[in-house]
Amino acid sequence: MSTRVITFGTFDVFHVGHVNILTRAHDLGDHLTVGISTDELNHAKKGRYPVYRQEHRSQIVASLDCVDAVFYEHSLEAKREYLLEHRADVLVMGQDWEGRFDEFRDVVEVVYLPRTADISTTDIIHEIKNRLED
Ligand code: C2G
C-alpha cells in the first residue's frame, strides 16, 4: 500500500530550508501533498501579508519534483478535515511546531523534523533591508 504524506506551510520567499523539509517529507512516503497557507490566513496568523502572493507560492512548491499535489490551507482549525480529505497517513512539520499537532495522532502518524539551521524568510527580509540601508 502506498503511503501518503502531507505537510503545511507558507513557503514565502522560498529558500533551502523549504527545499530540505519538502525533500525529507517526500522521502517518508510515496506521495506528498502540501497545504499552502493563504495570504489571508497569514495575515491573521502573523499580522502581515507574505511577500509572495499565494498563487506564486503555490506555483513554486508545485513545480518541485518531490511534490505531487498542492492545495490552499484557508484555516488552521480545519487541519483534521484536510488530513481526511487528502487521505494522509503521515503529517510532517518542522520542529518549530513540535507538539502542536499531536492531537491528530488518532488519524495520522505525526513527524516533526529538525529545521534547517541559520535560514528563515524573516532573516532574508532583514538582510535585504540592511543591504538597502547601507
Ligand atoms: N522550515 C525548516 N527550516 C527552516 C525554515 C522553515 O524546516 N529554516 C520548515 C518549517 O518548520 C515548516 C516549513 O518549513 O514546517 C514551512 O515553513 P513556513 O513557511 O514558515 O510555514 P509556517 O508559516 O510555519 O506555516 O498549518 C501550519 C502552518 O501553515 C505552517
Image (tube, rainbow, N blue to C red):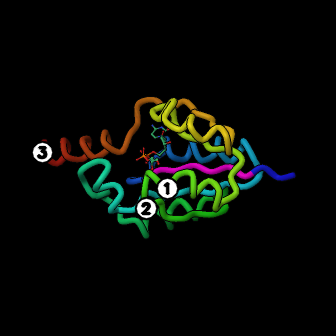
Q: Residue at x 19, y 46 (%)?
A: 129
Q: State the image coordinates of residue 33 (x, y, percent, origin top left).
A: 63, 57
Which is more foreground, mark 1 or mark 3? 1
114 or 76: nearer the viewer: 76
- Dots 1 and 2: beta carbons under 8 Å? yes
Q: On the image, numbered disc 3 is attached to which residue?
A: 133
Give the residue type at disc 3.
Glu
Q: On the image, numbered disc 2 is attached to which residue?
A: 74
Q: On the image, numbered disc 1 is attached to which residue?
A: 78
Q: Quadrant of residue 122?
A: top left
Disc 3 Cβ-to-ligand 1 distance below 8 Å: no
Give the residue type at disc 1.
Ala
Which is more foreground, mark 1 or mark 2? 1
Q: Earlier in the sequence, mark 2 or mark 3?
A: 2
Residue found farthest to the right: 1
Q: Mark 2: which secondary structure?
A: loop
Q: Mark 1: which secondary structure?
A: helix
| Magenta-colored span | 4-9
Please rate how many residues cluster around mark 3, counting C-alpha atoms within 10 Å: few if below 14, some from 14 to 19, many from 20.
Answer: few
Q: Residue at x 46, y 29 (%)?
A: 117
- Dots 1 and 3: beta carbons under 8 Å? no
Q: Does the stretch in magenta take in 8?
A: yes
Q: Residue at x 64, y 62 (%)?
A: 85
From mark 1 to mark 3, how far is it between C-alphas?
A: 41 Å
Asked if residue 7 is positioned above or below residue 54 in the image, the reply reads above
Any mark on residue 94, and which? none
Asked if residue 48 is positioned above or below residue 63 in the image, the reply reads above
